[in-house]
């Protein structure tokens, strides 16, 4: 049996990341992978990057990582309310000003995709890790997508399972012949009703892959206080407390 943990979308929320890493450690899982978006929306972007780097956790380049690494201009998104648009511009600008040059370089060198192959007995399991899709790190694929979208991803990557993040909403979808499409949710900015930190455990043996989405509590008030004491809009503190803000 082999177990790996996959998490995504930390978004500068160090208390949430530390809680997830402690839970993974408690379970005795040695192999960890991150699908990206280490920065923006909470004040510990540098600390999050440095922890991922210092622990040698393989990490993909999320769309927010790419924007900060290469100083890509922020453009309004039609799906956002004016309130969120205004807050988003300020929060991303905060990252651009505060992420160190060394950490921006680290973000700039992250891979776009990662494909894993595990051999257990006579069986090879192929696992495709992406931030959002095979062709983009900024595509929103939700559970309600037609099965064909995920089946095509599995076929194109020639894998048994594809794991993604980006939307901050976890799901598991199974298909014929033991194939899976999974969103591991978000560590630091969950859009789920409970706002808990979310990650994925994959348990593999020679016969099957068993996916489990784990959701855990973390010191939310510490993160809220950190946001309120920073130059990041309080919009993101209210969001984590699940107060009424406009989100999509």
Image: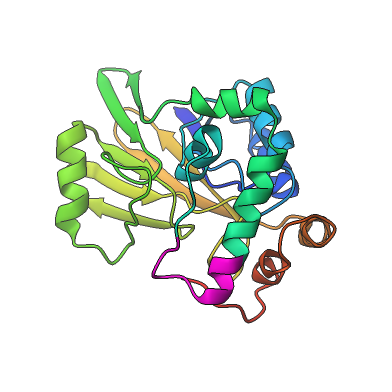
Residue at image position (29%, 39%) is: 161
Residue at image position (65%, 74%) is: 242
Residues 93 and 185: in front is: 93
In the image, is 212 to the left or to the right of 146?
right
Task: Please state the horizontal and vertical placement of residue 164, each as a whole percent of the image.
Answer: 39, 45
Residues 6 and 80: in front is: 80
Task: Please state the horizontal and vertical placement of residue 73, each as a whole percent of the image.
Answer: 48, 47
The residues colored magenta run 76-86
Residue 113 in magenta? no
In the image, is 127 to the left or to the right of 83?
left
Residue at image position (15%, 45%) is: 152
Task: Please state the horizontal and vertical placement of residue 93, each as a whole percent of the image.
Answer: 63, 50
Q: Is residue 200 above or below residue 240?
A: above
Q: Is residue 70 above or below residue 243?
A: above
Residue at image position (26%, 22%) is: 123
Residue 79 in magenta? yes
Task: Please state the horizontal and vertical placement of residue 197, each as a whole percent of the image.
Answer: 62, 54
For the N terminus, give its image quadrant. Answer: top left
Q: Coloured how?
A: rainbow
In the image, is 128 to the left or to the right of 19?
left
**Is residue 22 something one can see in this rendering?**
no
**Is residue 110 something one can see in this rendering?**
yes
């Amino acid at each position: 049996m082999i177990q790996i943990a996959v998490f995504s979308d930390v978004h500068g929320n160090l208390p949430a990341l530390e809680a997830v890493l402690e839970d993974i450690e408690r379970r005795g899982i040695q192999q960890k992978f991150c699908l990206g978006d280490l920065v923006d929306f909470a004040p510990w972007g540098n600390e999050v990057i440095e922890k991922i780097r210092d622990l040698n956790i393989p990490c993909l380049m999320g769309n927010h990582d790419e924007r900060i690494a290469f100083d890509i201009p922020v453009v309004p998104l039609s799906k956002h309310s004016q309130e969120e648009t205004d807050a988003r511009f300020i929060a991303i600008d905060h990252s651009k000003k505060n992420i160190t040059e060394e950490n921006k370089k680290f973000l700039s060198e992250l891979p776009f995709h990662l494909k894993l192959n595990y051999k257990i007995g006579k069986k090879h399991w192929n696992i495709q890790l992406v931030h959002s899709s095979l062709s983009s790190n900024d595509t929103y694929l939700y559970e309600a997508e037609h099965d064909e979208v995920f089946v095509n991803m599995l076929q194109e990557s020639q894998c048994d399972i594809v794991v993604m993040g980006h939307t901050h909403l976890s799901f598991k979808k199974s298909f014929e012949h033991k194939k899976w499409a999974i969103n591991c949710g978000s560590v630091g900015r969950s859009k789920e009703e409970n706002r808990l930190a979310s990650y994925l455990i994959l348990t593999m043996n020679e016969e099957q892959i068993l996916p489990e989405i784990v959701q855990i509590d973390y010191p939310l008030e510490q993160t809220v206080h950190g946001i309120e004491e920073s130059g990041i809009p309080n919009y993101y503190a209210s969001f984590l407390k699940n107060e009424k803000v406009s989100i999509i």
